[in-house]
Image (spheres, helix red, strand yellow):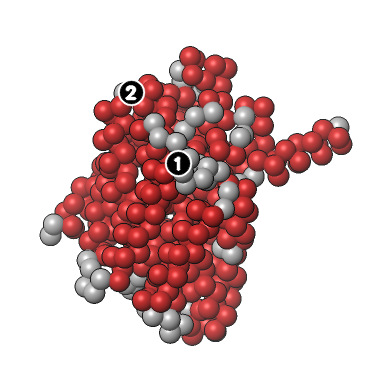
Amino acid sequence: MFHRLKYHIAVFFSVIGPGFITAVVDNDAGGIFTYSQAGAKYGYLPLWTLLPIMALLIVTQEMTARMGAVTGKGLSDLIREEFGLRTTFFMMVALVLANLTNVMANFAGVASSLELFGVSRYISVPIGALIVWLLVVKGNYASVERIFLFATLLYVSYIISGVLVKPDWKEAAIYSVTPVLLFDPAYITLLIAMVGTSVAPWMQFYLQAAIVEKGVTAKDYIESRIEVIVGCVVMTVIAFFIIVACAGAIWTVAPRDIKDSTDAALGLKPFGDYAYLLFAGGLFNASLFAACILPLSTAYTVCEGLGFESGVNKRWNEAPIFYWLFTLLIVIGGGVILIPGFPLVRMILLSQVINGVMLPFVLIFMVLIVNRKSIMRDWTNSPAYNGVAWTAVVTMIGLTLVLVGITLRDLWA
């Protein structure tokens, strides 16, 4: 029994990477802003959403990872094979537009976090973009994954910041399990945004592509499934401490809207330099990390969907479209941040609309594919799991449609 346990532990550490990285990087600049806003304006009230959000994330991520391990193919590859090139092409166009605006948001996070330390964005953004580009273009999958895993460790800064603020832990615990609905459009919008920022289309495409490139197979899947679940739990814990930190530092003093994630960091300053510096440093790490993952996810997705060679293990001459697309996304995403007066907030709102339109289709395709015996063999969903999966799909469609409607209203108001 002990030898079997040692074997499973060894396999777990051999497959760790894709699921953990995908879930944790979900707390990017946009996610940090959303959770900071929740705590700053509503205190501990929104904490109850984190458990159902975690459940939804686990369901979608588990199905994605299972498809990658069993088929050895990326999600966009499977969609092209099962639903045709035309459907895949339009999905790829929408995904590129959505991810490009998210890349812009993350380079804005790099710029604003280092501006807190007196570093101009005209220095931080070009250097950050160059680091991201060199990491992927000059590395291989193993080296890139090791750096990504190290970056996930730095998210502990949000946990330490939350502790240093000394929030009301009893109140946080109560509201974590007590649903609170306010008939306030801003509150409802925020709750929907919290779901939307946690289950994004790019995550499903990146996770499956990474599972395939890492070489995880059905034989390793039990350990890979555990890794996916652990990643989703860690993502939820980080979100919890971001909300708690802002509730304790900002809401208890004067509940308000925040302008961006750096505004939240400044709100922690009265509680000591460590809390402030750790939150700001965490924002920089999360933004730079996501500015690397999102272009990489997009390059994987588009190349798989349209039949081009892709992968970090390939050289530039072996996968030129993959690397040119990755490079272009970084250049445009970082470049627009340097344009004075660029309407970044409007672009972020637009990206939410595009994500909202895409997500229901992606989830439906996933559930249809994972239930096809010809593709998944003995690894299709059980009836009970299908019930959970379709509930997740219906829930996400309903929330997404409401979010799209509200965002469109605000966008063109």
Q: Which residue is under mark 2?
A: 83
Q: Residue 313 placed where, x, y %?
A: 56, 43
From this viewpoint, is residue 8 visible? Answer: yes
Residue positioned most to the front = 317
What amino acid is at disc 2? Answer: Phe
Crowd band around label 1 with a 10 angstrom C-alpha radius: few (<14), some (14–19), many (20+)? some
Q: Which mark is residue 369?
A: none
Q: Along the horizontal axis of the image, is 178 left or right of 400?
A: right
Q: Quadrant of the C terminus?
A: bottom left
Determine which residue is flagged by label 1: 319
**Left or right position of 287 against 170:** left
In the picture provided, is 296 more to the left or to the right than 356?
right
User: Which quadrant of the figure contains the N terminus?
Assistant: top right
Residue 87 rendering spot, x and y as whole percentages: 28, 29
Determine whether 69 is above or below 322 in the image. Answer: above
Please identify the residue farthest to the left as the structure is shown. Answer: 413
The type of residue carrying mark 1 is Ala
Question: Between residues 214 and 246, which one lies in front from this camera angle?
Answer: 214
Going from N to C along the chain, the mark reached first, 2 or 1, is 2
Q: Secondary structure at mark 2?
A: helix
For the residue pair 210 and 23, the one nearer the viewer reads as 210
- Judged by depth in the image, the label closer to the viewer, 2 or 1, is 1
Q: Kindly identify the residue that appears in the image at 36 percent across and 67 percent down.
A: 108
The answer to the question of whether label 2 and label 1 lie on touching residues, with beta carbons closer than 8 A, is no
Q: Residue at x 76, y 41 (%)?
A: 10
Element class at badge 1 = loop
